[in-house]
Structure formats: C-alpha cells, structure tokens
Amino acid sequence: MIPKDIEAYALAHTTDDSPVIQDLIKAAEQELEHIDMLSGRQVGRLLSILITISGAKRVLEVGTFAGYSALTMAEALPEEGELFTCEYNERYEEIARKFFNKSEHGSKITLVMGKALETIPTIPGNFDLIFLDADKINYPDYYELLLPRLNRGGIMAIDNMLWGGEVTDPGTDKARAIDRVNKQVAEDPSVEQVLLTVRDGITLVRKK
Ligand SMILES: C[S@@+](CC[C@H](N)C(=O)[O-])C[C@H]1O[C@@H](n2cnc3c(N)ncnc32)[C@H](O)[C@@H]1O
C-alpha cells in the first residue's frame, strides 16, 4: 500500500537484522514458497523496541513460519525472558528450529507444534506481549482466547489488520474476519488500541 520508493527509504533507515536472522531470511527465500508471510524488518524492529521499552519478559507468538519474528523478539528479551511460538507446518518448523539452535537467544524460545487454537490453552501462564500473525479467518476467535492471557498493561500486536486495503470493503472471508476483529477491538472497553499503517497494517492493543 506504501509506494515502493518510500518503503525502500523507510527500510534503509531502520535497524538491520542480526547476522543469524539475515541467514534465516536467505534460507527461507531459498527453501520456502510464500516468503511474503515473513513479517519483515519494520514489524520485527517495532516488536523488538516494544519489548525493550515495556520490559516484557513473557511473549507469545501465534504463527512462527521460518522463525523470523520469534528470533527477532527473543533477541530483545532479557536473559531470563521466555517466548512461546505456535506453528503447525513441519517444513517451517524445521527451518525455525535450525536457526533457533544457531542463535544464542534460541534457548528463550519454545516452539509449540499443532493447531494454535488447540495448543494455546496448553501453554502455561500469562504474557506481557502477544504477537498474533496466523490464520486470518480465526482472528476473532484468537482475540477472545488471547485477551484473557494478556497481563494488564500488556500489549497484543496483531498483523495484517488492513489486509491489503480490502478491509474497507471486505469481499472475502479473510477480509471479513479481519474487519470483524478490528470492530471487536474498537468496541472493547478493556483496551486502547492504534491501527498503524505499517506494511499491511499492525494493530497495537494495550490491555488497561
Ligand atoms: C504470516 S506467517 C507467520 C510469520 C512470522 N510471524 C514472521 O513474521 O516471520 C503465518 C504462519 O501461521 C501458521 N499457521 C496458520 N494457521 C495456523 C494454525 N491454525 N495453527 C498454527 N499455525 C498456523 C502458518 O503455517 C504460517 O507459518
């Protein structure tokens, strides 16, 4: 949605990924299709800065893919920090685990395999930050499931909330699901939120 030259300029002025994460991206580009699922440096750095300034120690991610955002967030967590990330595709699991093992921050990460709506209830405790970036059709259900797991003052970041602009006139099931969760968040008195027009739209929800 952002003109390509502006996007390139913004990226040129955004902190680089670590060498391990740059290798992860190269491996994902070579070995996987759907590489556009990887959230990228603007979203990654935003999450990293949110973790640093909020002092978050427990993070939950829904949607690992090759592990890009999980490892970016793990790098920002303190030594005793913990990150759980949910994925159900074993091909993606293989790449993610390989790079978690290569990184000194990988020991903070627990990769939870299976359908996330079923595995999330098996993960213990509450979270300071939650990053929702999985199957869009289930976003309304994820929001209901995840909000009680967010600590007061905690942040839920939800990716793809503009769905390429389709949300303004939703004509597909995914666009309708995302529009529904946008309304769910906007009408929820227990949170404050901002929908940022970064990349494909990322909403930051803070639990009051
Ligand atoms: C957009 S990608 C995640 C990208 C990742 N957060 C990043 O920034 O690199 C979404 C991921 O969610 C996974 N996924 C989709 N539906 C799922 C489900 N029901 N349970 C677990 N994982 C799911 C997909 O396999 C895919 O890897």
Image (cartoon, rainbow, N blue to C red):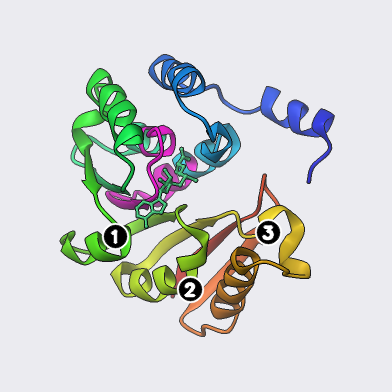
x, y (%) of residue 180?
59, 76
Q: What element carries label 2?
A: helix
The answer to whether the residue labelled 2 contacts the one labelled 3, judged by CB atoms less than 8 Å apart, is no
Label 2, residues with CA under 10 Å away: few <14, some 14-19, many ≥20: some
x, y (%) of residue 32?
46, 27
Is 162 in front, or is 130?
A: 162
N-terminal label among 1 and 3:
1
Amino acid type at circle 3 is Leu
Disc 1 target residue: 127
Amino acid type at circle 1 is Phe
Q: Residue at left 31%, top 65%?
A: 117
Q: What is the distance, in whole Å, between disc 2 and disc 3 at their CAs?
A: 15 Å
Label 1, residues with CA under 10 Å away: few <14, some 14-19, many ≥20: many
Mark 1 vs mark 3: in front: 3
Q: What element carries label 3?
A: loop
Mark 2 vs mark 1: in front: 2
Q: Residue 162 carries which label?
A: 3
x, y (%) of residue 181?
55, 73
Q: Residue at left 56%, top 41%?
A: 43
Disc 2 target residue: 140
